[in-house]
Amino acid sequence: MTESTHSPRQRLRDTIVDAARARTIASGWDAVRMGGVATAAGVSRQTVYNEFGSKAGLAEALARREVDRFVGDVRAALVAHGDDVQAGAYAAISHTLATAADNPLVKAILTSSRGGSDELLPYLTTRAEVVLDEASGALIEWADGQLPGADRAALTFAADTIVRLVVSHIVLPANPPDQTATALTNLAVRLFAAARPALSGQERD
């Protein structure tokens, strides 16, 4: 049975992971100590060990949190603009570019790059395919609702292409994020529109 996100224990775990996340971004994972996380979270060191078992267990929880939070934010950005496909796509793409620029943990997950701690890296990079798949899935689900009748294979290809292009611009940015987001959004709209060949065929008939 899944533990409620509002249960006292889950709130405790969230507080500890939040503390670990803040200290990791500030100082790097190698500098993080279980005792320091406990102090920042306002709990005992033993409590941290009781909840996560080891520093490796805490790293795993932190990586999972980053994936869940990132994909959740992408979903929220997509749906925030209702039926406006261009605005929804721009919001999701610009959010991703900005988040990767500001958050070294997210950037490490998305790019599998060695931009962060070697000790934390395995827990982050093993999530790379997961987060790319989940981000593509969120995009497909959203586009499917916006473009009823779209060809699923073409829609899947479009979503996967957009996600991979966004990541490529995170790895090697060529322009300011807002300019890149605009260009990628225009491409995304064209790719999604091309996923509706059945509708065009009906119109020609």
Image (cartoon, rainbow, N blue to C red):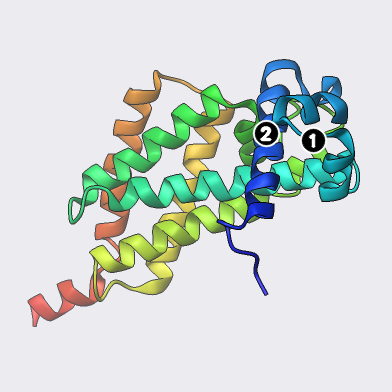
Where is residue 42, by image quadrant? top right
Relative to 204, 93 lies left or right: right
Q: Residue at x 88, y 43 (%)?
A: 49
Image position of 193 with respect to 201: above or below: above
Q: Is residue 171 visible?
A: yes
Locate residue 115, reporting x and y percent. 72, 24
Q: Secondary structure at mark 1?
A: helix
Nearer-the-camera pick, 152 or 99: 99
Query: Is residue 33 something one can see in this rendering?
Result: no
- Answer yes or no: do the residues labelled 2 and 1 have beta carbons within 8 Å? yes
Between discs 2 and 1, the one toward the N terminus: 2
Relative to 48, say whether 10 is above or below: below
Which residue does the numbered mark 2 point to in the structure image?
108
Quarter holding residue 2: bottom right
Residue 127: x and y, percent? 70, 49
Task: Left or right? Give the position of 5 relative to 92.
Answer: right
Q: CA distance from mark 2 to mark 1?
A: 7 Å
Query: Residue 186: x and y, percent?
Result: 27, 41
Kind of residue at badge 1: Leu
Residue nearest the viewer, comparing 141 with 205: 141
Mark 1 — residue? 121
The residue under the point 90% across, 48% down is 53
